[in-house]
Amino acid sequence: MEKIQVSIEKLPGCDDIEFPRYMTECAAGMDVFAAVKEAEILQPGERKIIPTGIRIALPAGYEAQIRPRSGLAIRNGITLLNTPGTIDSDYRGEIGIIMINHGQEPFEVKRGDRIAQMTVHRVCRVLWHSTSFLQPTVRGDGGFGHTG
């Protein structure tokens, strides 16, 4: 498993907020924690940006993706918008999590709650080659639901 070093900074007033961390030995994603000053209530259908209290500096050639937590989704109907969210290697602002409540009940986000997952990936750059012919495949142009 590849390991890279990434610089991370806690914002002022966030010393009590954990850095993102893997919850098991083989976890692909790190849990990300809420840095709300006081509890935030997400009403059904409501969305809010929840602060994390951290900034990161990814090396060039990498990106971080922000993804929902499955437990919040199944138990409470809580997910993330713009999923997966992309954090580019040149972004240096606070990471914010866009949460939405698709559930039936209000949902409380408390300081230190695990609210999302973060994964880090290599990035490749595409060099487009214009052509008037694409190699055919069995699938062809079969789109949404074409396999049944």
Image (spheres, rainbow, N blue to C red):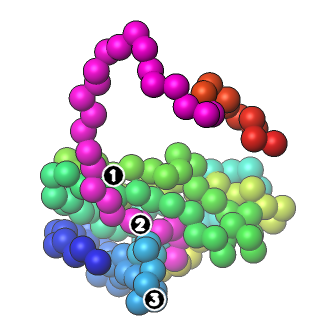
Q: Residue furthest top?
A: 132
Residue 62 can be seen, yes or no: yes
Q: Is the residue 61 above or below the residue 25 in the image?
A: above
| Residue receiving disc 1 | 87
Which residue is found at the position 69% from the left and 51% from the top? 46
Q: Main secondary structure of the magenta part?
A: loop
Q: Is the residue 62 above or below the residue 107 in the image?
A: above
Percent x, y of residue 143: 67, 31
What label does residue 24 carry, if any?
3
- The numbered mark, 1 or 3, whose residue comes first in the sequence reads 3
Inter-mark Cα distance, 2 to 1: 10 Å
Inter-mark Cα distance, 1 to 3: 23 Å
Going by the numbered disc 2, the residue's amino acid type is Met
Percent x, y of residue 51: 43, 62
- The numbered mark, 3 or 2, whose residue comes first in the sequence reads 3
Residue 94 can be seen, yes or no: no
Q: Nearer the viewer, residue 20 or 113?
A: 20
Asked whether disc 2 touches disc 1, contact meaning CB atoms under 8 Å apart, the reply is: yes
What label does residue 118 carry, if any?
2
Which residue is found at the position 45% from the left and 50% from the top? 85
Image quarter of residue 1? bottom left
Inter-mark Cα distance, 3 to 2: 14 Å
